[in-house]
Image: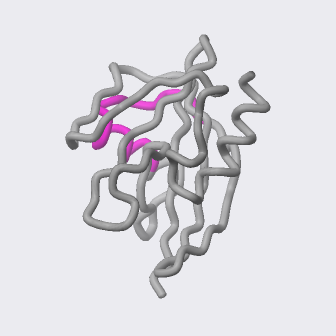
Amino acid sequence: MNHFHVAAGILHDSAGRVLITERLCDGPFDGLWEFPGGKISDGESAEGALKRELAEELGIRATALRPFMELHHEYPDRIVDLEFFLVSEWRGEPAGLEGQGVRWLPAAELDATELLPADAPVVAALQQMLS
């Protein structure tokens, strides 16, 4: 079974809104939403991977991030270890550079059923922290 180590960013603004991006793929999660990020390469730190992914996917440069939560999730075909970071400052305006949708939502309006299954515990923790 494939095993992935992933870094994901939770961009949040002063109004308590959180950024989510649409997942575009040919797999079972096509069309669901997620926190932006991606796989951590060999020899790369989680923080470094996240900064790289945010630049590639959203065209921004993260300047302030801190660890938020680590999760282990087992899907039927893969195992994913995720490191989530709160991203409170960045340079540039986030845009879907790979054709993916981008939405800002108040934390209270995040719906775990619209996000990847592994993101559900993060939604609950964010709603408690940002509401």
Residue that sits furthest to the top in the current view: 15
Name the colour scheme. one colour
How many marks the image carries: the answer is 0
Is 111 placed above or below 83 here?
above
Residue at the (60%, 12%) spot, across then down: 14
Residue 52 in magenta? yes
- Foreground: 124 or 35? 124
Rendering quarter of residue 66: top right
- Foreground: 73 or 55? 73
What range of the chain is rendered magenta? 50-65
Residue at the (65%, 67%) spot, across then down: 72
Residue at the (46%, 36%) spot, across then down: 20
Give how far across and how far down residue 47 sits, in percent.
Answer: 52, 48
Give how far across and how far down residue 120 sits, in percent.
Answer: 64, 51
Q: Quadrant of the C terminus?
A: top right
Residue that sits furthest to the front in the current view: 113
Residue 57 in magenta? yes
Rendering quarter of residue 73: bottom right
Residue at the (79%, 32%) spot, across then down: 128
- Foreground: 108 or 71? 108
Apparent side of residue 40 relative to residue 46 in the rendered image (left or right): left
Give how far across and how far down residue 69 sits, in percent.
Answer: 70, 49
Residue that sits furthest to the bottom in the current view: 1
Apparent side of residue 76 relative to residue 38 in the rendered image (left or right): right
Is 22 placed above or below 73 here?
above
Give how far across and how far down residue 4 sits, in percent.
Answer: 48, 71
Rendering quarter of residue 26: bottom left
